[in-house]
Image (cartoon, rainbow, N blue to C red):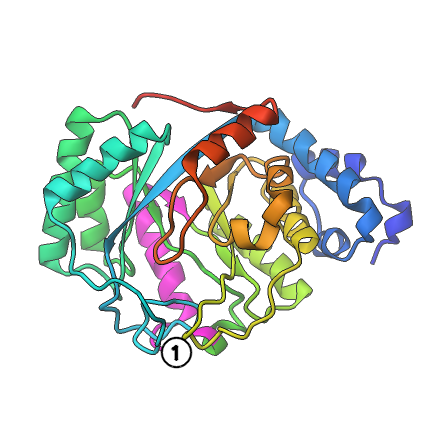
Amino acid sequence: MLNTIELNWSELAEKAMKEGITKEEGLQILQSDEKELLSILHAAYEIRHHYYGNKVKLNMILNAKSNLCPENCGYCAQSIVSKAPNVETYPLLDKETIVNGAREALARKAGTYCIVASGRGPTDRELDTVVEAVKEIRETIPVKLCACLGLLTEEKANRLKEAGVHRYNHNINTHVDNHENITTTHTYDDRVETIGHVKETGMSPCSGVIIGMGETDEQIVEMAMALKDLDADSIPVNFLHAVEGTPLEKQEPVKPTKALKVLALMRFMNPTKEIRVSGGREKTLRHLQPLSLYAANSVFVGDYLTTAGQKVDWDHEMIEDLGFEIETRAI
C-alpha cells in the first residue's frame, strides 16, 4: 500500500480521470488520516467539477407501494422480517396518484422522479399501472423518469423502456461476500442479472450501495470497483439508517468523516458517473452534509421510503449557500 504521506491527492485525481485508480489507492482514501479529509474532498471536487461543474441534480422518490414485501433484507423496514413500528402498508398507488407525484417532483425542482415499489418484483397488473402512469407523465410533465420495482425479467424491462422510463434503479447494496448476511431470499447475482436486463433495453442503469452493514474497507473499495465494472450511470450512496425493529437496528452508525471519504472514493473510482448522496445522509452526515456535494453531484430531496428527509427548502438553501446551482432541464 502507498504511504499516505507520499500520496498527492490532486495527482491521484488526475490519474483517476486519465487511467483510473487501483484498489490500494482506494484503500488509501478510506484509511487516510482525518487531517487529510479536506485535501481529499478538494481533489474529489476537481474531478466532479471537470465533468459536472457546480451543477447539482435533484431526485425525488415516490413510495408507490409500501410494506407487503416477501424479501428478508435486514436493513429494510418493509421486509417480511421487520417489526418496525409505524410503517404504512398499502398496495400500489393508482395511476393518478403516481402522475401527481411527478408534478410534486417538478415543484421541488427535481429533474428525476423515481417510482419505487416494495416487493420481489412487479406483477403484471402492477406493471400495467406503472406503464400507464409513465406514458401520461411523458406526455405532460418535463421530468426524467426512474423506476425501482425490484427484480425484472427481460420482458418486463422492455415494457418499461417502451413506456418511456429513462432509468432503472437496482442497487447491489453490499459486497458479494456480505450479501447472505443481509438477505437470503435473493442472491447478489439476481441483482446483477436485473441490471443486465436494464442495460440490454437501453435504459440507463442506476445501481448503488448501502454503507454501514458490516462491510470492511476492502469490501467498500471492491463495491466501488464492482459498480465501475457494471458501468452504472448513476450511483446512489446510502448510509444505513438503523431502524428500530429491523435485524440491523443495533448496527453502529458510520462516522460523518468516514461517510465523506466513501463519497470521495466513489468519485475517484467512477469519475464520470452521477454520484448521489442518498438515504441516511441527514442522520449520518449531520452538519457535514454540505461537504458531501464536493464529491457527489446529485441528491434526493424530500422523504425516503419509510424515513423522513429534511425540508426541501433546506436542501435548496444548502446548494445555493455552496455557490452551486440546481440543474433544471426539460426532457
Of 106 and 237, nearer the camera is: 106
Residue 98 image offset from top left, x and y in percent:
18, 43
Residue 95 image offset from top left, x and y in percent:
11, 43
Q: Secondary structure at mark 1?
A: loop
Task: Name which quarter of the figure residue 140 lies in.
Answer: top left
Residue 109 drawn in magenta: no
Numbered range of the magenta stretch? 182-206
Query: Farthest residue in the right direction?
Result: 5
Q: Is residue 146 visible?
A: yes
Residue at 77% across / 40% down in the picture?
38
198 w.r.t. 183: above or below = above
Residue at 41% across / 46% down in the picture?
206
Task: Name which quarter of the figure residue 89 lies in.
Answer: bottom left
What residue is disc 1 on?
A: 184
| Left or right: 131, with 55 as reference point | left
133 w.r.t. 79: above or below = above
Residue 203 drawn in magenta: yes
Q: Is residue 163 visible?
A: no
Residue 240 image offset from top left, x and y in percent:
51, 61
